[in-house]
Every structure is written in C-alpha cells, then in structure tokens.
Amino acid sequence: MPNQSIKNTTKSAAPTEPTVKVKKITPPQLVRGMHDLLPAEWPWWNFISSVIKEQAEAYRFERLETPILEKLNLFTRAIGGSTDIVEKEMFAFVDKNEDHLALRPEYTAGLARAYIEHGMMALHKPIKLFCFGPVFRHERPQAGRFREFRQYDFEIYGEAGAAADAQIILLASSFFSKLHLPITIQINSVGCPTCRAAFRQKLVDYFRSKRSHLCEDCKRRLVKNPLRILDCKVEECHAQALRAPQIVDSLCLECSTHFTKLLEYLDEVDLAYQLNPYLVRGLDYYTRTVFEIWAEGDDGKNTLAAGGRYDNLITDLGGVATPAIGFAGGAERLILELKARAIPVPEIPPPDLFLACLGEPARKKAFRLFEELRNQGVKVAESFTKDGLKGQLEIANKLKVKFALVLGQKEMMDGTIIVRDMENGIQEIVDLKKVVTEIKKRIEASVTDTSLL
Ligand code: ATP
Ligand code: MG
C-alpha cells in the first residue's frame, strides 16, 4: 500500500519511494547425484545408443523395458540382503498405500520378474532381451559415480551351455570395439551354491586368521559375505586376498567343465581375456561365470560393464527353472571414458537447408513452405522470430547448411524464391511452385555422408 509508506516517512521535504520488499527466491536445484543431459552431451548419447541398437540387431536381442518403480522386496529377494545395493544404496520408500517400493538399482531383477509374470518360460528358448534406461543408487557421488545413471543391459534366458556365456562376452567385447575403446576382459567362475559353500568355508578359515588386517567392511563381510573380501579395493585387504585360496581350485566337476568350455569358445574366436581369481561381483545371484570389462590401464576401480550367469535367480523368485546370463554397463561412465580418451563421436548432422524470409506476408508463406519441405523429408531450419535478413543468414552460416532459401517481398510478388549456395554465395531465382522439387535435387546431388566415423 503506497499511501501507508508515504505516511510513515519522516519530515524530509521530498517524499521517499515506497519500500517494496523483494522476496528472495531461491532457484530450484538438482537433487544431489542427479544430472541433466544437456544438448551438448547428445552426440555421445546418440553414438552409444546407436551402437547398443546395432549390437542388439546383430546378435538378435529384443528390447524389453520394465518400470523404474518396483516393489522393494523384488530387489531384496533377487539381489540379496547382504549386498551393498540392498544394504546401503536403494532409493526405497513407502507410498500413500503403505506399499514398500524402490527405484530400480539395476535391471536384472525387474527383467526376471517380467519373465515370470509374462509366462516367457513357455516361449521358444533362448530368449534374448536388452534394455537401456535409468537406474538409481544412493551412493556417494564422485567422478563416474552418480545416484541416477543409465545402464544398458543384455540378457539371455533359457540357455545353460557355455556358448551363451561366450556370446554375451563377445557381444560386450565387440560393443567396446565399435566404440573404439580399448578394454580388458576379466573372467572368473564363482561356481554353484554347492561348490561355493565349500569354498566359502575355506575363505572364512583363511581370512579369520588375518582379521586384524581387514577393513571394517571386510570384518563384517567375513560373517555375511566373505567372497566379497576378495574384490575389496582397500590395499591391506587386497594384500591379504592375494594369498587367499582361489575358487577355481574348489569348483565341482560340472562348474569347472563349464568354465573350461567357455574359455575354449573364447579361444576359438581369439578373444583375449584375463583370468581374475579376485573377481566375485557384488550381487548374490551369480553362479558360475562372472566377468567385468575394464578400460585398458584401469585396475577395476572404474569398471565399465559387468555381468555373469544367474541360473537360480528365476527359481529363487518362484519361477520355472531357467538358466540365464547377462551383463550391464553404465552409460555415463562409458561417455566419461570416451571423452577422456578423446575418442571422436559422430556429430549430429546439420540441417540441409535454412529458410529465411523478409516481412510478414513472406513469413506466413515461409511458414507453410517449411511444413511442405519437412513433409518431403528435407531437414530444414528457420528463425521465424528474427526480422533482419543478415541475422537470419548468420544463423544459417552457424548451422553450416549448404543452401538457404530467401523469400522477400519482391519474390512474393513474382511468385519466386532465391536459392543461395552458402559455400560460394551464388544466388539463383527459382519458381516458388517448383522450389521443393528443385531443392531436393540439389541436396541429393551434394550429399556426403557425415553420419559415419
Ligand atoms: P562398482 O564396483 O563401480 O560400484 P558395481 O559392481 O556396483 O560397480 P554393477 O552393479 O555391476 O556395478 O553395475 C554395472 C555397471 O554400472 C558398472 O560396471 C558401472 O559401469 C555402472 N555403475 C554402477 N554404479 C554406478 C554409479 N553409481 N554411477 C555410474 N555408473 C555406475
Ligand atoms: Mg557399486
């Protein structure tokens, strides 16, 4: 109320301005660990998406997407109560109906649920599925570690033979080759519940005598999940792990035969790999084959992708026994690695054409012409909100288009339009009615494919 503030002023001659209290508004901010994928990032995202799609087509995987939100107990049952994911990293909450829900921390549990729920056991095997989308883990954000990140995931259901393990590893390996990223493949077998139980006991006996050298997490793991001590990244624990018993020596005959066969398949295609006895993976559901993909020179602290076999997962969730194998990788981590190694990615191709206009009647006509060109498959850009021709042509230059169409008042009256070659500045007057056909011909004649590396 301005009057009131005038009354409140002191005796000074000139009335002061009414004081308007400006409420400070705090702009909204990202939730910690989340990130926006800004336009500049998309050449990388498009590149990896296209390679994921290529791999799916080449190896005949079909896409299946599950919801981001699932019942909490799906993950606790599938992933295992003593894993980092379930113990510490889940975004879990109770909704308005008192349902216990969680944002998916990975894809496999949801895919297994979908497999059972849609009766896929009745389908012809193997069933090859892939997905690509966001997953959530409440971890401490740092380089390459986010709370929301995207995973690509490939899984084969209904194939127990080692050929499926080999194919999944080959798919992963050729995926990184197509991205021009040098990697190493780390492989191990974690056996089946029977041989693993015996190995677990051997490990507990060994690490118990080294207990004082273990980190606090590993002291807990000694009781809950002793295999995970083997891949602890704390130096002292790793030093103890170097002399620990190795699981390959404890595998039962079936598991060791399976592992040997897998290695034979990989040798058959000359795929280089490293046997890594310390690789156990963080999830309880793995049986037999486990593997990780590391960027060349990395020591496993920044794993690009990881996977393995989980033959008991479907039965553990109440489905009909179905062996399965799969792997998943983090897309953000992959993009960071591509950038760190300055690996070129295809640019988003520029539009074919820029449509410029002068004056309101021409703008209306251009508005319509834009739609005609677009319907004819011409990639056309415009800047209808800019008035001056100079400003419009500057944008055309920035976009690196080969041609610009200019529609001014004179052309409107003559029923023509100017075609400008942006490389040499040569202009030509063309009949407005024929311009779509005319420009298509020129674009086709000038095409060089920029979409491939
Ligand atoms: P890490 O040992 O790095 O925590 P993990 O064993 O928990 O990885 P998986 O559950 O196997 O990871 O997930 C597969 C892939 O997803 C990882 O190899 C990695 O590329 C990616 N990933 C896992 N956690 C994150 C995260 N918090 N942020 C970004 N990417 C991640
Ligand atoms: Mg983790």
Image (cartoon, helix red, strand yellow):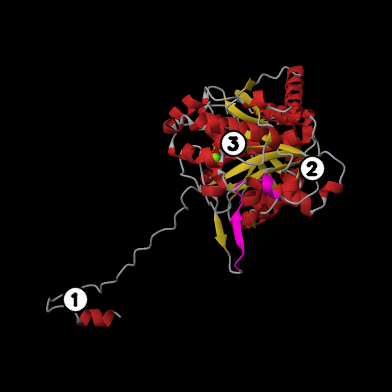
Question: Mark 1 vs mark 2: which is more N-terminal?
Answer: 1
Sequence-wise, which precedes: disc 3 or disc 1? 1
Q: Residues within 10 Å of mark 1 (few under 14, many from 20)?
A: few
Q: Amino acid at mark 2?
A: Thr
Per the rendering, the mark at residue 322 is: 2
Q: Is the CB–ligand 1 distance for label 3 below 8 Å?
A: no
Q: Which residues are magenta?
A: 98-110
**Answer yes or no: do the residues labelled 3 and 2 have beta carbons within 8 Å?**
no
Q: Marks 3/2: CA distance? A: 36 Å
Residue holding disc 1: 15
Mark 2 neighbour density, 10 Å: few (under 14) some (14–19) many (20 or more): many
SS of the residue under disc 1: loop
Q: Which residue is mark 3?
A: 44
Mark 2 CB lies closer than 8 A to ligand 1: no
**Residue 390 falls left or right of residue 110:** left
Q: Position of residue 352 (x, y in %)?
A: 67, 38
Residue in the picture at 63% in, 46% down: 79
Tag on residue 199? none
CB at disc 1 and ligand 1 closer than 8 Å: no
Which image quadrant shows ligand 1? Answer: top right
Residue 83: image x %, image y %? 57, 44
- Of marks 3 and 2, the one in the foreground: 2
